[in-house]
Image: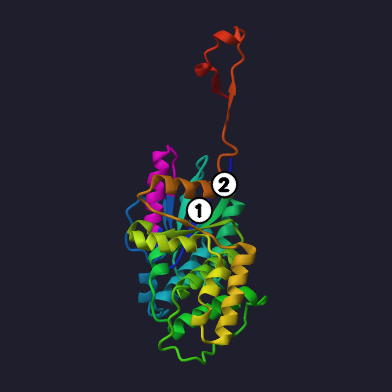
Amino acid sequence: MPRYAQLVMGPAGSGKSTYCSTMVQHLGSLNRSAHVVNLDPAAEHFDYPVMADIRELIQVDDVMEDPSLRFGPNGGLVFCMEYFANNFDWLDESLGHVEDDYILFDCPGQIELYTHLPVMKQLVEQLQQREFRVCGVFLVDSQFMVESFKVTGTVFEWLHLFIWFLFVPERTGVHFNVVIKANMESHIFPPLHIQFISGVIAALSAMVLLEIPQINIMTKMDLLSPKAKKEIEKYLDPDMYSMMEDNSDNIRSKKFKNLTKAICGLVDDYSMVRFLPFDRTDEEGMNIVLQNIDFSIQYGEDLEFKEPKEADEDPDNLNYDEAFQDS
């Protein structure tokens, strides 16, 4: 029997742990068992029982306190994940093998793990070798999409980094310099928010790196106002070209307009990124999300099916409520 896994990914604060907790409860209401594995060595608390916890293997606090390493929070987390990649035997011992396993992996939010570091790709390969069918679940905070903010040089650097990752074939060992020439003090791009562009490219970078089926989700829909929910609809299945044309007058830089057009073309022409809304108070919406994930990993195709009984009696007298039995 195959085993099934969701890699729950996304930026810090996007709701990964809440998603895992809510999805486990929802699966329980459907009489389906599911387990959660915490892979964030910097996690502090979560409100669900864990099948395995990477903090039993290594913790960020311990790495940061080691005088021989002298890492900060980000460097410490990367060190922890690389240490984890060299000790996959721990994961084997923790998971064991239960028939029809369905496991959610609550992953760290550092973007480096999904752009140019091989740790998460190695994890996927290890799981696939252990007969797991793996689906990536990439979360983006819906509130992040509808809030306007000033775009700083840091945001542009991340955007250029994502573009470089997607379009430069030989990424390993390449030194990439970001040169920002424009004045970054007061750039605002409503209503085609720069947040949406960065969220899309973050999801794309994970898809390119991991090479697994991926479902992209907008979380925290239950926290949006009715007006914000209506506004967010255009981002779920976006018409990128129309959005760009509506806002072309707001983009003063020709270079930035060309970059935006290239990104819009990538997303729109190939239909590579679409989002599903996730409202933890909406059972029907959670069912839609779960159905998309199950379909991507072909969950249930190996489950036993029922076949009709062979009956000699007259079909007119057959009780169809009792006409089926377990195979």
Q: Nearer the viewer, mark 1 or mark 2?
A: 2
Residue 143 coordinates in the image, percent (x, y): 38, 66
Query: Looking at the image, which is closer to me, 223 or 327?
Result: 223
Whether residue 78 is situated above or below residue 253 in the rendered picture: above
Residue extent of the magenta highlight: 17-35
Q: Residue at x 67, y 77 (%)?
A: 170
Query: Looking at the image, which is closer to me, 261 or 1?
Result: 261
The residue beneath circle 2 is: 295
Element type at mark 1: strand
Q: Is residue 118 visible?
A: no
Question: Tag 2: residue type?
Answer: Phe
- Taking the view exactly as shown, the residue that stands out farthest to the right is 169
Q: Residue at x 61, y 76 (%)?
A: 262
Q: Earlier in the sequence, mark 1 or mark 2?
A: 1
**Which image quadrant is residue 312 in?**
top right
| Secondary structure mostly seen in the magenta stretch | helix
User: Is residue 297 found left or right of 26 in the rendered image?
Assistant: right
Q: Determine the CA span between mark 1 and mark 2.
A: 12 Å
Residue 177 coordinates in the image, percent (x, y): 56, 88
Asked if the magenta segment contains residue 133, the reply would be no
Q: Which numbered dot is residue 6?
A: 1
Q: Is residue 168 visible?
A: yes
User: Is residue 213 found left or right of 91 in the rendered image?
Assistant: right
| Badge 1 vs badge 2, beta-carbon distance below 8 Å | no
User: Is residue 21 found left or right of 192 in the rendered image?
Assistant: left
